[in-house]
Amino acid sequence: MFEVIETEDVQDIEHLKNILNYYRSYGFKYALDDIGVGYNTLKRLLEVEPDVVKLAFEFTNGVSKNEKQKKVAQEMLAITHKMGAQALAEGVETEEDLKFLIEMGYDLFQGYYFAKPQPTSVEEIHSIYA
């Protein structure tokens, strides 16, 4: 899996889609990173149809306590699932936010709650619902 990031304003969307479809034909999947930030807008989401939609940190960190973030997270989840993609919440730093996002229906999670960047991979993460 690779990510299409939010810092580049891709001018030729058809060219990007051709590249993504080429890799998809070989079994690769791709994620659209940081939805709602930079150039990764709702329009871009609909244009590239990713396998995974990553909701930006700004909308997930503290979501369990913020009504506006809850609304954005819920709407993005609904759009993502209607597209047949998986919803990933970035920036999960507390158990409270993780539980909230799990109950909301998010599929995947990443953030400091699980681990900070390390020189070697984390072998196993135990679920809080195990």
Image: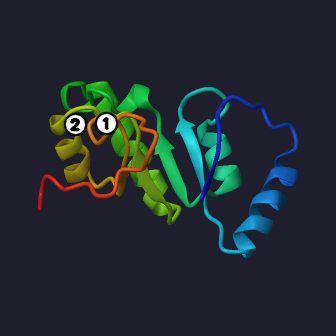
Residue at left offset 19%, top offset 26%: 65
The residue nearer to you, when weighing 47 against 20, is 20
Q: Which mark is residue 92?
A: 1
**Dot placed on the residue nearer the N-terminal end, 2 or 1:** 1
Pointer 1 local density, CA inside 10 Å: few below 14, some 14–19, many at least 20? many
Above or below, 9 against 55 in this view is: above
Image coordinates of residue 39 in percent, x first then y, are 67, 31
Query: SS class of the residue under badge 2?
Result: helix
Q: Amino acid at mark 2?
A: Asp
Above or below, 12 against 128 in this view is: above
Looking at the rendered structure, the number of numbered marks drawn on it comes to 2
The quadrant where residue 38 appears: top right
Q: Nearer the viewer, mark 2 or mark 1?
A: 1
Image coordinates of residue 97 in percent, x first then y, are 22, 36
Query: SS class of the residue under badge 1?
Result: loop
Q: Is residue 65 left or right of residue 8?
A: left
Q: Which mark is residue 39?
A: none
Which quadrant of the figure contains the C terminus? bottom left
Residue at left offset 46%, top offset 40%: 119
Image coordinates of residue 99 in percent, x first then y, are 17, 45
Above or below, 75 against 72 in this view is: below
The quadrant where residue 76 appears: top left
Which quadrant of the figure contains the N terminus? bottom right
Quickly name the residue at label 2.
Answer: 97
Query: Label 1 near label 2: C-beta < 8 Å?
Result: yes
Image coordinates of residue 116 in percent, x first then y, are 36, 34
Q: Amino acid at mark 1?
A: Val
Most distant residue in the front direction: 119
